[in-house]
Image: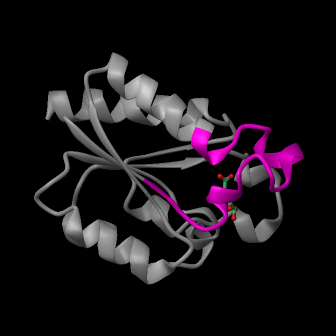
Amino acid sequence: MKLLVINGPNLNMLGIREKNIYGNGSYKELLEYIEKVCDEENIEVDFFQSNHEGAIVDRIQEAYGDFDAIVINPAAYTHTSVAILDALKAVNIPCAEVHLSDIYQREEFRHHSYISLAAIKTIYGKGFEGYKEAILFLKNYVIEK
Ligand code: DQA
């Protein structure tokens, strides 16, 4: 199985940004954590991080025909981006949405996710472990399909 992990704006600042919300782990540590999970599960993984909406749309389009599943933390674009939602719908690759924090316990503008309309699973409030849960869920989903 080939998995693409996409992280949106400001997630490259993990370990620096709002540690009380997102924890102490850095973006590099997040990638190492995901790599370990994928190694154990025999999953081939690619990473993409961007602070730009169009770049994320481009990467999703390029994934068409090349990846079995996508894990995405769209970060702030979760709450604004019809373009990322449409790209995920266009490629129709099974997708799980992850948020490090519990977006439903935060400001009201974070309670709505456009991306949830394309995701087969949304995981929030579990920190790095949310990515693991998403990966295991997608692995099962892809095998059973
Ligand atoms: C986030 C939650 C978003 O509301 C926020 O804009 C982020 C990160 C999370 O991982 O908890 O940048 O997606």
Q: Quadrant of the C terminus?
A: top left
- Residue at the image position 28 percent from the left and 30 percent from the top: 139
Q: Nearer the viewer, residue 87 or 3?
A: 3
Q: In x, y percent, where is residue 10?
A: 67, 64
Q: In x, y percent, where is residue 125?
A: 69, 40
Residue farthest right in this picture = 20
Q: Nearer the viewer, residue 116 or 52?
A: 52
Residue 22 is a magenta residue: yes
Above or below: residue 18 compared with residue 35? below
Give the quarter the ligand 1 occupies. bottom right
Residue farthest left in this picture = 65
Q: In x, y percent, where is residue 46?
A: 33, 47
Residue 23 is a magenta residue: yes
Above or below: residue 101 compared with residue 65? above
Which residues lie in the magenta part?
6-28
| Horizontal side of residue 46 vs 54, given as left or right | left
Q: In x, y percent, where is residue 6?
A: 44, 56
Above or below: residue 134 compared with residue 71? above
Above or below: residue 11 compared with residue 77? above
| Horizontal side of residue 119 vs 1, given as left or right | right
- Residue at the image position 29 percent from the left and 43 percent from the top: 3
The quarter of the picture where residue 26 lies is top right
